[in-house]
Amino acid sequence: KTSIESLSLHQIEDWSADVWVMSPPCQPHTRQRDDNNNSNEQRAKRQDQPHHNECQSTNKNRKTDLDDPRSKSFIKICELLEKCQNLPSLIFLENVVGFEQSKSFQRWTHVLHTRQYYVGHFHLTPTQVQLPNDRPRYYCVAIRGIGSDDSSSSVVLPSENIILEIGRAHV
């Protein structure tokens, strides 16, 4: 058993997986977190403190989702993808709605853009594809080698009315 953080580029290259599927920890990206990476409960406790001043926080002291220790595995995947010579043809990522407003998302889309992936981002409730879970989720599908120009392609997903517009990743 190996943690993602300890994977080497050599291991990734040796495995030469053509498909990567991931669901990084969602806690750093949930809607219950604020700009300082505090939960709703932590904010409530601070507001009860007599000398708390919300304005004391400055941008340089703010923590982002990338600073959260639970993001280490995702950051490692991004680093490996940047360096990998034998790139997967398909990458599928699932996370919470709101991930697309995170610094992790910005890092992710930058890596996909530099590696020339065509990317589709969308929200989907699993019940739309007959999975018994009614929580809306963020999904990203990244594909290499589906076209030779920057135009978009339509991909029909395995459910009746879901069409995903795939286009070149943008930063």
Image (spheres, grey):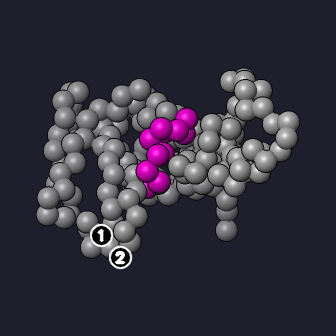
Question: In percent of the image, x 33 and y 66: which residue is there?
Answer: 126
> As rendered, which of 4 and 133 lies closer to the eye?
133
Measuring from the top left, give residue 74's x and y in whole percent: 58, 47
Q: Give the residue drawn at x 70%, y 47%.
A: 43
Task: Name the amino acid, label 1.
Answer: Thr
Q: Is residue 159 magenta?
A: no
Label drawn at residue 40: none
Task: Give percent across and percent down for residue 119.
Answer: 32, 40
Q: For mark 2, does the 10 Å Cα neighbourhood hold few (<14), some (14 to 19), or many (20 or more) residues?
A: few
* 32, above or below 37, in the image: below
Contact between marks 2 and 1 (CB within 8 A): the answer is yes
Percent coordinates x, y for residue 122 in the rendering: 32, 48
Residue identifier under label 2: 132
Identify residue for label 1.
127
Mark 2 vs 1, N-terminal side: 1
Residue bounds of the magenta highlight: 94-105
Whether residue 72 appears in this view of the structure is no
Question: Which residue is found at the position 46% from the left and 46% from the top?
Answer: 98
**In this view of the protein, which residue sits in the foreground, 138 or 154?**
138
The C terminus lies in which quarter of the figure?
top left
| Label 1 SS | helix
Picture quarter containing residue 129? bottom left
